[in-house]
Each structure stands twice: as structure tokens, then as C-alpha cells.
Amino acid sequence: MLAINRAEEIVRMVLDAVGGGEPDLFRQLDQLSAAIYLTDENGFVTYFNPACIDFAGRRPALGQDRWCVTWKLYTEEGGFLPHAQCPMAVAIQTKKPVRGVKAVAERPDGTQVTFLPFPTPLIAPH
């Protein structure tokens, strides 16, 4: 429960910084120990903090990686999870935050880590 509360706190911090037009947003995100990345409205990664590299075991490719920063994804039960069906993709496609879904990231070296993503779409007014 503590980890979920901390994750929600980090999400609130990021949303506050983005919503306030915080000029030092990326510098602040770079300091977080939690893996944070941003995508455009089509799901292409536009930013990632250093913790993403540690988490994913690879450097995400800006503008090329779509939906996710990980190499491969699996469901908590072990089934392959295509990036186009990952929690971030679902959040962007539905324009709603996704909560309570665990996933397993596989790094290029074969190690796996179970994680609880908190994808939260920020919809800019048109």
C-alpha cells in the first residue's frame, strides 16, 4: 500500500508541475527515482528521465518507441503483452488514467521486473 501511495504522490507532483507550466519540469523529473516518461497524443515517447534507463535496461528511442519504454512486456500471469495493449496505450486511447494493473517488463538482458504503472493522460485544450 505504501508503494501505491508513493506512486500516486509522484503522479500528483508531475501533474501539478505540468499544469502549473513549471519551467524546471524536466529538471525536476530527472531527479525522481521513479521511472517517468511522456508521450505525444499518438503514444510516441517524447521524454524519459534517467530512472527509465535503469528500469528498462535500455535507452528509449525518442519519437520511435511507442506506448512504452520497455523492451518487452508481459501480463502479471506471464502472457505476452503487446505494447499497443499496454496500460499506457489504453490510457491514451481511452483518455483515462489506468490504475491497479500490474505488468512485467523484460529488459534486453533477459531480467524481468514486475511493476505497477500509473499512466495518466494529460489532455491539452484545443
Image: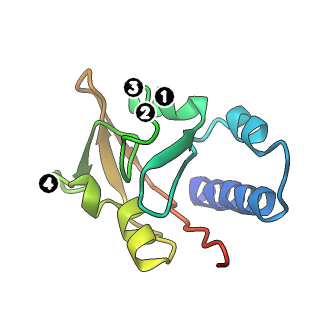
Report the amino acid beneath label 4: Gly
> How many neighbours does mark 1 have within 10 angstroms: few (below 14), some (14-19), or many (20 or more)?
some
Tell which tag, 4 or 3, sits nearer the viewer.
3
Report how far apart the C-alphas of labels 3 and 1 lie in the structure: 5 Å
Tag 3: amino acid: Gly
* Mark 4: secondary structure: loop
Where is residue 24 drawn, in percent x and y? 83, 42
Residue tagged 3: 57
Foreground label between 2 and 3: 2
Residue found at the very far front of the displayed protein: 126
Residue linked to disc 4? 79
Q: Residue at label 2?
A: 60
Task: Measuring from the top left, give residue 98's x and y in whole percent.
Answer: 46, 70
Instruction: Give the number of the mark in front: 4 or 1.
Output: 1
Reading the image, the residue beneath label 1 is 53
Which residue occupies 57% across, 32% down?
A: 51
